Amino acid sequence: MTGATGTVVDRGAAWVYEGVWGVLASWLMVPRQAPTLPKLDGVEPLSIRPGRAWLDYLRFWFWLGLTVFDGVLIGLWLIVCIVNPVLGALLSLPVFVLAIGPDLIVFVGIHLRYDTTWYVISPRSIRLRNGIWTIRETTFTFENVQNVEITQGPIERWFGFSNLKIETAGGGVTHTQHGPVSSGSNVAFLFGLENAAEVRELIMERVRASRTTGLGDEADHAAPGSIAWSGEHLAELRAIRDGLRTAAGS
């Protein structure tokens, strides 16, 4: 009976949230689909969303914060009721609103954050989208990626997901899920990945395949019209240089 009741509650909450999400998505013009990147080399961009474990992780911190905040608030109200029952009765409605209203807003915000977070990977770049009121899209080219690192704290490990930390050339900004933050390096995070190792390997493959990674494949991607200097060309140029030096010395 308890399981059936839980299922009914979950379905009801999902139905209410879908209604709220639909209204907000329409009102705030929030895109519900993944951001787009051009199809290159016949390869379709790969769209990735955080795993459900990340949503459970966010809700864990929500319930923890709710318990502490509401517990303190209701505890203080009960003390007031004991000391001054009339004042406690007058404060009952404000306390109820203060205890419930912010919780509903934060709970909906958590789900909106989850639903608006996307990571799209193409052969040349990766695009991150996040935000609720303000939608932010950040694009990094793989030729600028310097390091890709998997991070995982103990609570994240318990929930079963990891994050990817991507460092790129150029500095001064850290791209978090809350937007860009000034820092000493240019860093972006892919949160809530349940297959972080596979995503990291895919990104590293794209980095190695990019034409300016410094791995020796730049010549295969020479710009149209550029001159490829052979050994004979270089030898002739050195001979001309030496002849000019000799003429100048005489």
Image (cartoon, rainbow, N blue to C red):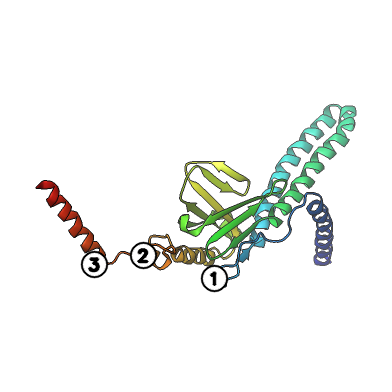
Q: Quadrant of the N terminus?
A: bottom right
Helix, strand or loop at disc 3?
helix
Q: Mark 2 or mark 3, which has the lower sequence index?
A: 2
| Residue depth check, mark 1 versus mark 3: number of the one nearer the observer | 3
Q: CA distance from mark 1 to mark 2?
A: 20 Å
Q: List the residue tagged with mark 3.
A: 232
Q: Residue at x 50, y 54 (%)?
A: 166
Q: Position of residue 215 (x, y in %)?
A: 38, 63
- Of residues 167 and 36, which is closer to you in this image? 36
Q: Position of residue 30 (x, y in %)?
A: 75, 53
Q: Position of residue 125 (x, y in %)?
A: 54, 60
Is 244 left, or right, of 218 in this rendering?
left
Name the kind of residue labelled 1 in the image.
Asp
Is 89 left, or right, of 168 in this rendering?
right
Q: Is residue 152 visible?
A: no
Q: Residue at x 81, y 65 (%)?
A: 7
Q: Mark 1 or mark 2, which has the lower sequence index?
A: 1
Q: CA distance from mark 2 to mark 3?
A: 21 Å
Q: CA distance from mark 1 to mark 3?
A: 35 Å
Q: List the residue tagged with mark 1.
A: 41
What mark, if any, has residue 179 been given in the picture? none
Helix, strand or loop at disc 2?
loop
The residue carrying pointer 2 sits among few (fewer than 14), some (14 to 19) or many (20 or more) residues within 10 Å by Cα, namely: few
Name the kind of residue labelled 2 in the image.
Gly
Q: Residue at x 90, y 28 (%)?
A: 86
Q: Position of residue 10 (x, y in %)?
A: 80, 61
Name the kind of residue labelled 3 in the image.
Glu
Q: Would you place residue 80 above or below residue 196 in this image? A: above
Q: List the residue tagged with mark 2.
A: 216
